[in-house]
């Protein structure tokens, strides 16, 4: 099955989160420097997102750079930031050309001014709220997001679920229906903890640069076979 055309709407996840893990190990296995793995991982983003959209998914959130990633060796962090600087615009241009809207989650103040400017320009390119959305999490941490949202909710007078939701980076997006993590690890690693409350979780040993359309479709089909009860019988 290549698409979601003959599946019911409830069998297709509206919002898919992807923890793109395994880039460094992919490079190490090939006796390459770790940044080579990150470059290979970036090249894989567009085809995977396009396959998800073709299936019927409306929104894809990518865990691209976590708050914890900043604790990696300075040389690797600098290489990651430079990769964002060089590849973010070309990659998102392809997606926007297909009608997608690109948004960002996280504390982008961490990044240099030129990188922030690129992000701002990208966000301004497609403001169609009905478009399929690519949400890229950069300097993102789920706990930090919840603390930030609760602080803003308290400042408005009362901490409630609806007010916290309104102050999340993803306030205009639906909750995550499912999360895919590549690379063999089986944890969320601080990824969208509030939005993942009832997400279906899928873990694969495939390293992110090797994760392709066939495996994505297989996982999406498995999602459609699950029964989601949301705590009910």
Image (tube, grey):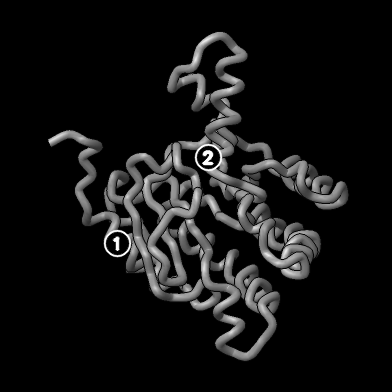
Q: Residues within 10 Å of mark 2 (few under 14, many from 20)?
A: some
Compared across the picture, whether 181 is left or right of 198 comes to right
Which residue corresponds to the image point at 63% horizontal and 90% vertical from the top-left? 31
Which residue corresponds to the image point at 17% horizontal and 34% vertical from the top-left? 232
Which residue is labeled 1 in the image? Answer: 221
Q: Earlier in the sequence, mark 1 or mark 2?
A: 2
The answer to which of 36 and 221 lies nearer the viewer is 36
Q: Position of residue 229 (x, y in %)?
A: 20, 40
The answer to which of 137 and 150 lies nearer the viewer is 150
Evaluate whether residue 98 shows in this view: no
The answer to which of 43 and 166 lies nearer the viewer is 166
Asked if the residue at tag 2 contacts the one at tag 1, i.e. Cβ–Cβ closer than 8 Å, the answer is no
The part of the image, by quadrant, that contains residue 42 is bottom right
Compared across the picture, whether 9 is left or right of 156 comes to left
Q: Residues within 10 Å of mark 1 (few under 14, many from 20)?
A: many
Label 1 – label 2 distance at C-alpha? 31 Å
The part of the image, by quadrant, that contains residue 185 is bottom left
In the depicted structure, whether residue 22 falls above or below residue 148: below
Compared across the picture, whether 207 is left or right of 24 comes to left
Which residue corresponds to the image point at 47% horizontal and 73% vertical from the top-left? 211
Question: Of discs 1 and 2, which sits in the foreground?
Answer: 2
Which residue corresponds to the image point at 53% horizontal and 60% vertical from the top-left? 49
């Amino acid at each position: 099955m290549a698409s979601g055309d003959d599946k019911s709407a409830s069998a297709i996840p509206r919002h898919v989160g992807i923890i793109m893990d395994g880039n460094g190990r992919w490079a190490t296995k090939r006796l390459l420097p770790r940044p080579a793995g990150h470059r290979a991982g970036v090249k894989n983003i567009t085809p995977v997102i396009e396959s998800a959209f073709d299936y019927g998914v409306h929104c894809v959130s990518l865990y691209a750079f976590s708050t914890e990633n900043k604790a990696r060796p300075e040389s690797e962090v600098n290489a990651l930031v430079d990769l964002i600087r060089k590849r973010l615009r070309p990659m998102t241009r392809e997606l926007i050309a297909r009608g997608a809207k690109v948004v960002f989650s996280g504390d982008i103040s961490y990044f240099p001014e030129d990188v922030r400017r690129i992000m701002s320009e990208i966000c301004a390119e497609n403001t169609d709220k009905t478009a399929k959305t690519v949400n890229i999490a950069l300097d993102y941490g789920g706990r930090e997001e919840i603390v930030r949202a609760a602080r803003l909710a308290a400042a408005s007078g009362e901490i409630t679920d609806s007010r916290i939701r309104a102050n999340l980076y993803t306030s205009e997006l639906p909750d995550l229906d499912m999360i895919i993590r590549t690379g063999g690890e089986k944890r969320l690693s601080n990824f969208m903890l509030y939005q993942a409350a009832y997400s279906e979780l899928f873990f694969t040993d495939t390293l992110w640069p090797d994760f392709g359309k066939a495996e994505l479709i297989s996982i999406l089909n498995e999602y459609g076979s699950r029964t989601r009860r949301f705590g009910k019988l």
